Amino acid sequence: MSSEREALFLKLVAEYPDSPMGHFSLGRLYLDEKRWAEAVAPLREAVTLDPHYAAAHVALGDAYAGLGKKEGAKSAWQAALGTPHGQRDLSLQADLEQRLRDLDDF
């Protein structure tokens, strides 16, 4: 099933390379499958295309955390906090602040 989803998201990225949604969806799929290294590039592209895409920053941080790259995770999660959504959503702020604390304890 995930190979069908992967093919769909790869097609979406190919057809709409300037849309962050396809890149994000592909990266999330890789995260869900714990394919941390593969998740980084599409998620990095999503945040490059839309620097205000909080969910993509969070997912990028998750990919880096999965790889054991604390500084990359920290940077991505801090970027998520700096987005308009990250500045308004108290629940997201609390979640990200906890993730950052957990990184420091790791």
Image (tube, rainbow, N blue to C red):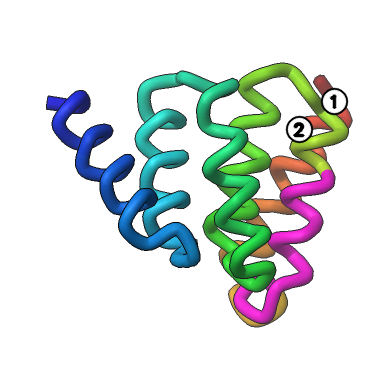
Q: Is residue 105 left or right of residue 96?
A: right
Q: Nearer the viewer, residue 52 or 45?
A: 45
Mark 1 neighbour density, 10 Å: few (under 14) some (14–19) many (20 or more): few
Q: Reply above or below: 82 against 73.
A: below
- For label 1, the SS is helix
**Residues tagged 2 and 1 counted as in contact (Cβ below 8 A):** yes
Dot 2: what SS? helix
The residues bearing labels 2 and 1 have C-alpha atoms spaced at a distance of 5 Å
- At horizontal 14% and vertical 31% (from top left) the residue drawn is 4
Image height of 43 relative to 48, above or below = above
Residue visible at 45% across and 50% down? Answer: 23
Amino acid tagged 1: Asp
Image position, residue 26 (x, y; %): 39, 41
Quadrant in which residue 8 is drawn: top left
Q: Nearer the viewer, residue 75 or 9?
A: 9
Q: Main secondary structure of the magenta part?
A: helix
**Residue 27 rendering spot, x and y as whole percentages:** 46, 40
Q: Callout 2, which amino acid?
A: Asp
What segment is highlighted magenta in the picture? 75-86
The residue carrying mark 2 is 102
**Residue 94 is inside the magenta segment:** no
Residue at figure coordinates x 29%, y 53% from the top left: 12
Residue topped by disc 1? 105
Question: Which corner quadrant holds the N terminus?
Answer: top left
